[in-house]
Amino acid sequence: MKKYRTRKGDGSFIELNENELKAELEQGTSDAADRGKISPLSKEELQYLFELFTYPSKFISVEMGNEVILSYDAATLKVRRVGVSTHRIQSLQVYEKLLGADMLEFDHVDYSIKPVKPIITFEQPELEQALLVTTLPLYYGAQPNLGLYNQPDGPCPNPGELYAAGKISEAQDSQEKAVEYAVSDMVQVGSEMYESGADGINFDTTGAAGDTDFLATLKAVEILRKKFPDMCIEVGMAGEFILGMHGGLSYDDVRLAGLYPHKQIELAQKAGVSIFGPVCNTKTDRSIPWNSARAVTYIKECVKNSKIPIHANMGMGVGGLPMVDHPPTDVVSRASKAMVEITRLDGL
Amino acid sequence: MGKEELFKQAMDAIISSDLKKAEEIAKKAIGEGIDPMELMSRGFRVGITRIGDLFERGEMFLPELIRSAEVMKSVSELIISALPEESREKSGVVLIGTVQGDIHDIGKILVASLLKANGFEVHDVGHDVSVETFIEKAQELNVDIIGSSALLTTTMKYQKDLEGELKRRDLRDRFKTMVGGAPVTQRWADRIGADAYGEDATDAVRRAFELLGKS
Ligand code: B12
């Protein structure tokens, strides 16, 4: 039987025959359906994915008219992360003028809210300069990164150590304290950068420290929304479900731990988020067709449940793409086309 | 009560982190002459594996996992004390840490708690740990397995360095090595010559038992 070349989640090449490829797609969608308790992709959608992954061209794209917004988080970091030494503002210009970006984010190399707070007066004039040389919507963004509020990096007793010692309620109390600190920092950084002219604020990799991280973000968004009714607030996620590092936290009477994208969006909307960036994590040991079918299944349900624009995370290790520094175009283009044309989302 | 029913109750006691019930079952089984190791592997350990799986799916959360792990620990001690002196051995000693330059430690914490819950003596050396520290601590604590976690493609190389450094110091045969973390795969483990790769916390426990010939 003819073999089709594709990749695994670690970027390595594999070859699958028709039956194997179809089985990967079916297993990928049923894995997401089973975990998220949502519907799997239909037969037609799976057939469509099969066609994308067997199409002979190296690179494919969406049909004309199906283009979506391309927004880049951590834009001032990504060019430099791969060793190209540009200034932050030049990175933005490269994205806008050479790579066709529609929305960008200006950020600090530490990329967390807490370290930005003491240097905010240095960030403001640079953001202002960046705004002068770009025309697209420009966010200021950083990660809530609640881990930084724990000892030794911050004031709260380390929940990891407390858990290891069996001190469960102490670990939970400490995490609740961290939420308070983080909310205050997120509101401060968000307000000050918005008042300096940022077109919006992006809280990226939300949920990285689990349910505490997500709760802090929702609370901060709620406060910022009241303060600035017209502000654009994007929230991007860290993982496909909210890790229950605390386990007992809720927002609007909904327990946060264990929520999948189609449930996360409901709370994000309630809190006042303008654009939501769901995530599906790549399993590096499985094939890209498996990962892509799985990601599309989650995001489709999220889009269905949403009244606000959805910009899904598509990049290294998320959205069905391999976890490598330069995700290769053969699979990036296939997984992206699948994501756009099946889920009908608004941006990547 | 039949043996199978007792095993099922043992599993349930772990899942519901019910210490009293778990101890009752252990005592009852021992009193009835059931092989304590079988009770462990077909009863209690099935429960903690299930907890690990539920955590991976977002259906169970860290406090529950820790509570169940504590119950598992108490019950393991009870069972070990019921074993004849000569067969009272620990599952094994594991050193675990996140490699240099990498601060991701959530996955590593989970792996460490599940290993502990399964009777391993675990020494967690934290995150951003140099190859030097891994080796020094492994020698000092005389561990059986060195487990390293790497979450970044840029820090995975320290897992390879660890293999090389162990060889250079003629220590490679003294320890078993196990690698994990989101970008890590079996292929990577094979390439660098690690003894095992664990996909998630439950898999890590399975592999650790295999490495020590106790699967
Ligand atoms: C949480 C997180 C963070 C948190 C970490 C908090 C903490 N205390 O751990 C914060 C916000 C601080 C962070 C920072 C960064 N992160 Co980060 N982070 C993540 C995220 C979202 C989830 C990781 C996680 O905890 N998962 C949940 C746990 C349960 O799963 P796990 O870690 O995979 O562990 C399981 C298995 O892998 C296995 N396992 C793990 N260890 C071991 C060890 C052994 C021995 C065995 C057998 C098994 C095993 O068992 C575990 C349990 O099932 C991932 C995305 C992802 N897909 O993984 C990105 C990710 C890993 N981060 C990434 C990046 C780039 C960064 C930053 C560089 C970003 C920045 N500029 O700030 C920094 C780097 C900081 C540093 N020097 O380490 C990238 C890495 C990409 C790459 N090419 O390497 C990822 C993939 C996100 C992305 N797509 O961009 N991050």
Image: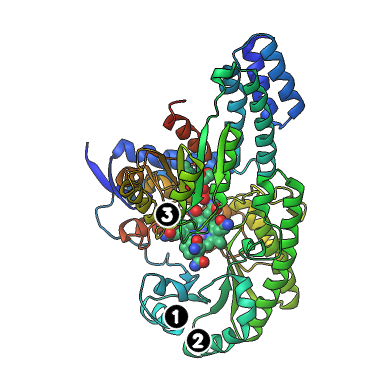
- Toward which corner of the image does residue B10 lie, by quadrant? top right
Specify whether tag 2 is near ligand 1 (CB below 8 Å): no
- Around disc 3, counting alpha carbons within 10 Å, would you say few (fewer than 14), some (14 to 19), or many (20 or more)? many
Tell me the distance, in whole angstroms, between the alpha carbons under discs 1 and 2.
8 Å
What numbered label is drawn on residue A130? Answer: 2
What numbered label is drawn on residue B131? Answer: 3
Which residue, as the protein is rendered here, is positioned at the far front? B140
Tell me the distance, in whole angstroms, between the alpha carbons under discs 1 and 3.
37 Å
Q: Which residue: 69% across, 32% down? A: B71
In the rendering, at what x and y percent does residue A18 appear? 29, 39
- Around disc 2, counting alpha carbons within 10 Å, would you say few (fewer than 14), some (14 to 19), or many (20 or more)? some
In the rendering, at what x and y percent does residue B127 appear? 53, 55
Identify the subunit bearing mark 1.
A
**Closer-to-camera residue (B127/B202):** B127
Identify the subunit bearing mark 2.
A
Quadrant (top left/top right/bottom left/bottom right) for the N terminus of chain A: top left
Left or right of B86, for residue A100: left
Tell me the distance, in whole angstroms, between the alpha carbons under discs 3 and 2.
41 Å
Secondary structure beneath label 1: helix
What numbered label is drawn on residue A92? Answer: 1
Left or right of A99, for residue B92: right
**Closer-to-camera residue (A185/A264):** A185
Tell me whether circle 1 and circle 2 mark residues in contact (CB < 8 Å).
Answer: yes
Secondary structure beneath label 2: helix
Q: Earlier in the sequence, mark 1 or mark 2?
A: 1
In the rendering, at what x and y percent does residue A70 appear? 46, 70
Tell me whether circle 3 and circle 2 mark residues in contact (CB < 8 Å).
Answer: no
- Same subunit under labels 1 and 3? no
Left or right of B80, for residue B207: left
Residue type pointed to by label 2: Ala
Residue type pointed to by label 3: Val
